[in-house]
Amino acid sequence: MKIPVIKQLIEKYSKEELEAAEAAIAEEQKPAIEIPGDDEGEQLTHAYAAIQVIQSMEENNVDFKTALREYTGRVRNSIS
C-alpha cells in the first residue's frame, strides 16, 4: 500500500469510478481507469483504500489527512 498512490487516486477519480475499477480488478478484468500497482493485489488494495478514505471524508466530514490516518490505523490494528 502506497500512500501517494491513494492520494493521487482520490484527487483524480470519483468514488464511483474507483468502485467500478475495484470491481473490475476483483473480476480479473482491466479497469476503465488506471490504478497504479505492482500487481492486481496492490491495485485492488489501492482502489479499496481510496474508496474507504473517501467514504470516511464524506461520512465524518473530515479532511483527507484525518481520514487517511484513521484508515491506516485500522489497517495497522488488523495486522497486529
Image (cartoon, rainbow, N blue to C red):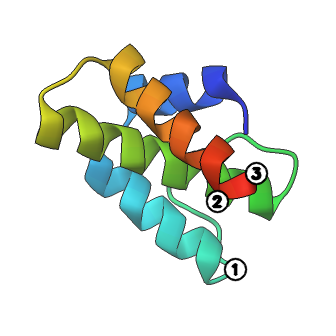
Q: Residue at x 39, y 49 (%)?
A: 51
Q: CA distance from mark 2 to mark 1?
A: 10 Å
Comes first in the chain, label 2 or label 1: 1
Foreground mark, 2 or 3, reads 3
Q: Label 3 crowding class (10 Å Cα cut-off): few <14, some 14-19, many 20+?
A: few
Q: In the image, 79: left or right of 56?
A: right
Q: Which residue is mark 3?
A: 80
Q: Residue at x 56, y 62 (%)?
A: 31
Q: Residue at x 70, y 79 (%)?
A: 28
Q: Which residue is mark 2?
A: 44
Q: Secondary structure at mark 3?
A: loop
Q: Label 2 crowding class (10 Å Cα cut-off): few <14, some 14-19, many 20+?
A: many
Inspect this view and state whether residue 14 appears.
Answer: no
Q: Quadrant of the N terminus?
A: top right
Foreground mark, 2 or 1, reads 2
Q: Secondary structure at mark 1?
A: loop
Please tell me in which quadrant of the rendered image residue 12 appears: top left
Whole-percent x, y for residue 36 in the image? 70, 40
Q: CA distance from mark 1 to mark 3?
A: 29 Å
Q: Which residue is mark 1?
A: 28
